[in-house]
Image (cartoon, rainbow, N blue to C red):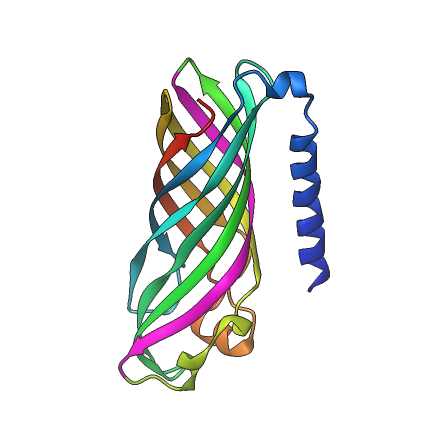
């Protein structure tokens, strides 16, 4: 594992531990734990392609919201999430022609600052770190051996920023969120020839179920 990845992981672990050692008296003020899931639309913003399409997908996981005050909380989550994109190449420089579908699946761990706006609305913002669980490329057209790229050709760790808005209705909440990746997806010369410095971009619509009500 690269040194910079170790620093990122250590930093996120430290943040998570800080969240977990909030005084119990504070955590007990309406702490919420539940499950969430929803619809993903992802992209990679690849250069030098003639056409690029979003990849539809899903996410599912668990969350805990730890109140710090009446208007502020910390919300760690663990989510399984599909990401990627499809792109049509017609590029003589890299000898690619046809359509590639990049299928990337991650475990996401966001740690979000939650700002409550009244009784039902919340704004979420904070960092996330992701672990790549699976990656593959499917293709159509005149494609070379680059289509055989697997998980080893992609960055195992991704990280970035998340921001979103949520509405609460008793035990059920609905929301939307955008995740912007800061780490390059490709991690080999072969992958970089196809993807360049592409990074993950993800929009989500979701529903949560509070299990502590």
**Towards the viewer: 172 or 200:** 172
User: Which residue corresponds to the image point at 67% horizontal and 21% vertical from the top-left?
Assistant: 24
Magenta segment's dominant SS is strand
Residue 182 percent across, percent down from the top left: 54, 52
User: Which residue corresponds to the image point at 54% horizontal and 13% vertical from the top-left?
Assistant: 70
Residue 116 percent across, percent down from the top left: 47, 19
User: Which residue corresponds to the image point at 52% horizontal and 18% vertical from the top-left?
Assistant: 30
Q: Quadrant of the N terminus?
A: bottom right
In the image: residue 31, left or right of residue 36: right
- What is the span of residues highlighted in magenta in the rendered image? 120-141
Residue 109 percent across, percent down from the top left: 55, 45
Q: Is residue 21 above or below residue 62?
A: above
Q: Is residue 192 above or below residue 158?
A: below
> Does the magenta portion include 124?
yes
Residue 48 occupies quadrant = bottom left
**Towards the viewer: 54 or 208:** 208
In the image: residue 149, left or right of residue 88: right
Q: How many numbered marks does the figure carry?
A: 0
Q: Quadrant of the C terminus?
A: top left
**Towards the viewer: 159 or 133:** 133
Q: Is residue 33 above or below residue 205?
A: above
């Amino acid at each position: 594992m690269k040194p910079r990845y170790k620093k990122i992981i250590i930093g996120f672990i430290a943040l998570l531990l800080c969240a977990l050692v909030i005084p119990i008296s504070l955590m007990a003020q309406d702490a919420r734990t539940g499950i969430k899931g929803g619809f993903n639309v992802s992209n990679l913003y690849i250069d030098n392609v003639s056409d690029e399409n979003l990849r539809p997908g899903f996410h599912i996981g668990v969350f805990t919201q730890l109140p710090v005050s009446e208007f502020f909380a910390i919300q760690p989550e663990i989510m399984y999430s599909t990401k990627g994109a499809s792109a049509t190449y017609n590029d003589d420089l890299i000898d690619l022609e046809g359509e590639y579908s990049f299928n990337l699946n991650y475990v996401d761990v966001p740690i979000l600052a939650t700002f409550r706006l009244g009784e039902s609305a919340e704004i979420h913002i904070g960092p996330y770190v992701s672990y790549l669980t699976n990656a593959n490329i499917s293709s159509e057209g005149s494609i070379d051996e680059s289509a055989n790229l697997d998980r080893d050709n992609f960055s195992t760790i991704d990280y970035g920023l998340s921001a979103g808005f949520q509405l609460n209705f008793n035990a059920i909440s609905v929301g939307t969120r955008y995740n912007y990746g800061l780490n390059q997806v490709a991690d080999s010369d072969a992958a970089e020839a196809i993807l360049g410095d592409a990074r993950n971009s993800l929009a989500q619509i979701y529903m949560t179920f509070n299990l502590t009500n």
